[in-house]
């Protein structure tokens, strides 16, 4: 029997927090976040996004509107004043950093060397998720993805496998 492996994209194939941490380190004033547990701050940022995920899926708000909401919400929870201009700049920088995500070289090596059938799942906006998969070289190198929005569900109902070598 041939081994079949399925991977989630976000925070499995790359460090999901990296674009957030880079944006925060560039945009917040020196020392402004020092008293804050950054892991908790990031998790709260993610939670703010999870609270409105359905609105993104249904097209009521855009990815960028979601990003502005996330940073404004988490900053409000931590008593950090931010205005719309800051939220817009944070979201722009966050999206720019997402264009520079990368897989750990050990994962790349593993995927290139394995003869297992590989699949990848991802949820969220189809175009946004495919852009990340493209940046990670998943589309042309070794993985054919399934995106939940394309499947019209919060999680994909089927998995596409990599073509055999």
Image: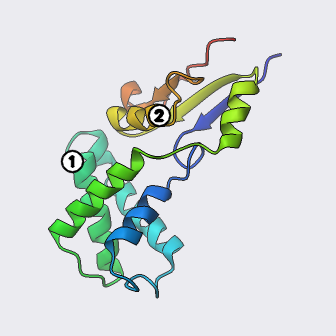
Q: Secondary structure at mark 1?
A: loop
Q: Is residue 24 left or right of residue 90?
A: right
The residues tagged by marks 2 and 1 sit, at their Cα atoms, a distance apart of 22 Å
Q: Secondary structure at mark 2?
A: helix
Q: Dot 1 corresponds to which residue? A: 61
Q: Nearer the viewer, mark 2 or mark 1?
A: 2
Position of 35 relative to 99 (above/below)? below
Q: Nearer the viewer, residue 62 or 163?
A: 163
Q: Nearer the viewer, residue 1 or 81?
A: 81
Q: Residues within 10 Å of mark 1 (few under 14, many from 20)?
A: some
Q: Earlier in the sequence, mark 2 or mark 1?
A: 1
Q: Residue at position x 32%, y 70% from top?
A: 27
Q: Is residue 9 left or right of residue 60?
A: right
Position of 133 relative to 73 (above/below)? above
Q: Dot 2 corresponds to which residue? A: 133
Position of 77 relative to 57 (above/below)? below
Position of 140 relative to 136 (above/below)? above
- Residue 91, given in percent of the width and then of the height, sits at 28, 57
């Amino acid at each position: 029997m041939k081994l079949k492996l399925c991977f989630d994209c976000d925070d499995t194939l790359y460090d999901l927090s990296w674009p957030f941490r880079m944006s925060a380190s560039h945009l917040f004033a020196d020392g402004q976040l020092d008293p804050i547990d950054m892991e908790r701050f990031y998790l709260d940022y993610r939670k703010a996004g999870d609270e409105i995920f359905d609105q993104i899926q249904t097209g009521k708000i855009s990815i960028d509107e979601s990003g502005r909401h996330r940073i404004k919400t988490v900053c409000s929870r931590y008593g950090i004043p931010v205005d719309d201009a800051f939220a817009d700049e944070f979201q722009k920088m966050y999206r720019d950093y997402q264009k520079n995500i990368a897989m750990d070289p050990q994962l790349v090596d593993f995927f290139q060397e394995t003869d297992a059938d590989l699949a990848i799942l991802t949820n969220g906006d189809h175009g946004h998720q495919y852009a990340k998969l493209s940046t990670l070289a998943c589309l042309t190198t070794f993985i054919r993805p399934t995106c939940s929005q394309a499947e019209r569900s919060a999680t994909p109902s089927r998995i596409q496998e990599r073509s055999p070598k």
